[in-house]
Structure formats: C-alpha cells, structure tokens
Amino acid sequence: MPKYKLISFPICPFVQRSTITLEHKGVPYDIEFIDLSDKPDWFLELSPLGKVPVLVVEEEEREIVLFESAVINEYLDEITEGSLLPADPLLKARHRALIEFASAGINDAWMMGTAKSREDALAHAAKLRDKFARLESELVGPLFTGESLSLVDTATIPMLLRAAWTEEIVPELALFADFPKVTAWRDATMALEAVERSAVPDLRERYRQYLAKRDGSWVGGQVSA
C-alpha cells in the first residue's frame, strides 16, 4: 500500500470527512497540521486551491497529490474493500449528488456560526433546517442507508457535529427539533469509533473557541455568556 499523508487544519470539517473515511477503512496515514491564516509556501505548491484537505500519495516511483474531500474519499473507497457507495450506477450518482448537497450544508453551518447578527444567523439556520428536512425524507436510519456507513455519512457527519455544537451555544437556533431521524442520525454517528478518532480530542471546544474569537460572530459572542 502507498504511504499517505493528510494535510489538515484541526477544525476543518472537510478534512474530517476524509479522516473519518481513513479511520473507518483502516488505512494507515500521517497527518500534518498547518495554519490556514499563514499558509506555508510548500503547501501552496501542493494545493492548487490553497485549501485542505490535501492527500499526498507516495508510491515507489511517484508521488501524487489529491485535493477536495469528495475526490479523496472516493479514491480511498476504490482502493479498499467494502465500497461505501452503491453498486447501482443511478444510486451511486444520487449519493454523489447528496455529498455535494452536504457540502452546501457545511457552508450553511459555517455561515450561521460566523454571522455578525442574530438576523443573519437565524437566516442561515433556516437554510440548514431546509436541508435537514430533505435529509429527513431520505435517510433510512440509524445511518443514511441503514446500519452500514456510506460516503454520504462521512460527507455529512462534520456538518451534523458543528450544527449540534452551535445549537448548544444558541438553543434558539432550534436546528434539530423537527427532525427526529436526523437527530438520531447525528447521535448514532457521534458514537462511531471512526468519528471519535477522526479529529483532535478537543475538537468541540476548539470549534467553540474559534467562534468566540471570530471577529463579529453573533454566535461566538454567546460562548462565554
């Protein structure tokens, strides 16, 4: 098996998508953390978009750099046993579409947490609830397709976690109240060993402190309240 090194920022949800997949698949990897506010030159040479995650794949005669979490996850799925995507081409395409849908949800969660006013935070919370409503109608439970983890799960879990942590700070956001299946999905994923091993041990507190220190964040302003 090639050697793998993941370039990460400790609280990045997109990185966590790939670390969940790596952990679930049992793929050995090294991880290197960088400061996204002061990106090193060597990283900018590796990452065409200047974003994490970046997966450096080192084989005997070549080194190839992969970027974008969805691409990294599909690669990891293809080189290991037990696919996390459906075999049926149409269902596989649907899962890929839902992975992109989850990416939009991650953006909503970030915009909600960093919004500078209560009004804007609630507006982004409404967008996130709309996405939860869609997911509520499609997921099987306890995970997206039932008992087995899928790439839709690994793509969505970071959003569910950050939404939960943000709602802890501001219960008024009421993100999960109307969605019992999404709530059960969130709780089931939190209990997975691959999820527990996918991030720094104090990720929840780091995320809270990130919002607290974010200039102008309305949610962040409630952290110490």
Image (cartoon, rainbow, N blue to C red):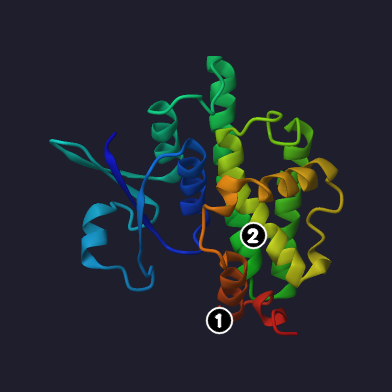
Number of callouts: 2
Which residue bears the numbered disc 2? 162
Residue appearing at x 53%, y 31% in the figure: 96
Cα distance between the residues tagged 2 and 1: 19 Å
Q: Secondary structure at mark 2?
A: helix
Compared with residue 9, is residue 219 higher up or lower down, i.e. above or below?
below
Task: Locate residue 123, reporting x and y percent.
Answer: 73, 61
Name which quarter of the figure residue 116 lies in. Answer: bottom right
Residue 215 got which mark? 1
- Residue that protrudes farthest toward the bottom in the picture: 225
The quarter in which the N terminus is drawn is top left
Task: Locate the C terminus by quadrant.
Answer: bottom right
State the image coordinates of residue 209 (x, y, percent, origin top left).
59, 77
* Secondary structure at numbered mark 1: loop
Q: Residue at x 36, y 47 (%)?
A: 29
- Please state if 143 lies on the left or on the right of 39 as rendered: right
Q: Residue at x 74, y 73 (%)?
A: 118
For the residue marked with disc 1, what is the amino acid? Asp
Residue 46 falls left or right of residue 152? left
Label 2 vs 1, first from the N-terminus = 2
Q: Is residue 72 visible?
A: yes
Crowding at dot 2, Cα within 10 Å, few <14 / some 14-19 / many 20+, comes out as many
List x then y, in percent, for residue 34.
35, 66
Q: Nearer the viewer, mark 2 or mark 1?
A: 2
Q: Residue at x 52, y 39 (%)?
A: 24
The amino acid type of the residue labelled 2 equals Arg
Between 198 and 37, the one lying in front of the other is 198
